[in-house]
Image (tube, helix red, strand yellow):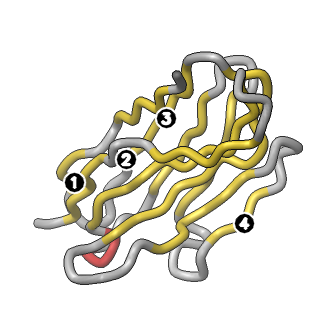
Amino acid sequence: QVQLVESGGGLVQPGGSLRLSCAASGSIFSINDMGWYRQAPGKERELVSVITSGGSANYADSVKGRFTISRDNAGNTVYLQMNSLKPEDTAVYYCNVTYYGISKRWINAWGQGTQVTVSS
């Protein structure tokens, strides 16, 4: 069984920074895309950023220039460095990973979510 463990959320003032981490563990042979989504109260879940196994990254327009995604392939970990945070960044952030495991098929999995609150 594969687990995605997220960390790094919390309360931060506007203009501050946070770094989210998501570590995938278990019977994983290979990982394709790794990404972050977020869901604010009363809104649908939206893509924040995704990074391919080759290191190519895409970002939502709302976070471009402020957020940076990276990954450690050896550690099966994806990071999201969030700078210049705004109150509208407040949401539950979810890690999303596509992996190939013992079932011998590609599976898309979600983390449990970590709360990010930007407020003075």
Q: Amino acid at mark 4?
A: Asn
- Label 1: few (<14), some or many (≥20) within 10 Å? some
Q: Secondary structure at mark 4?
A: strand
Name the residue tied to disc 4.
Answer: 58
Disc 3 or 4, which lies upstream in sequence? 3
Please identify, in this view, whether the residue under mark 2 or under mark 3 is nearer the observer. Answer: 3
**Mark 4–mark 1 CB contact (< 8 Å):** no
The residue at which mark 1 appears reads as 12
Q: CA distance from mark 2 to mark 1?
A: 8 Å
Which mark identifies residue 18? 2
Residue toward you, 106 or 15: 106
Give me the C-alpha separation between circle 3 and circle 1: 19 Å
Kindly identify which residue carries mark 3. Answer: 22
Q: Position of residue 104 (x, y in %)?
A: 79, 30
**4 or 1: tag closer to the N-terminus:** 1
Q: Amino acid at mark 2?
A: Leu
Closer to the chain start, of discs 2 and 4, is: 2
Distance from the alpha carbon under mark 2 to that under mark 4? 19 Å
Report the Cα–Cα distance between label 4 and label 1. 25 Å
At label 1, the amino acid type is Val
Give coordinates of residue 88: x percent, y percent.
30, 78
- Looking at the image, is mark 2 or mark 1 earlier in the sequence? 1
Find the distance from the CA under tag 2 to the CA under tag 3: 13 Å
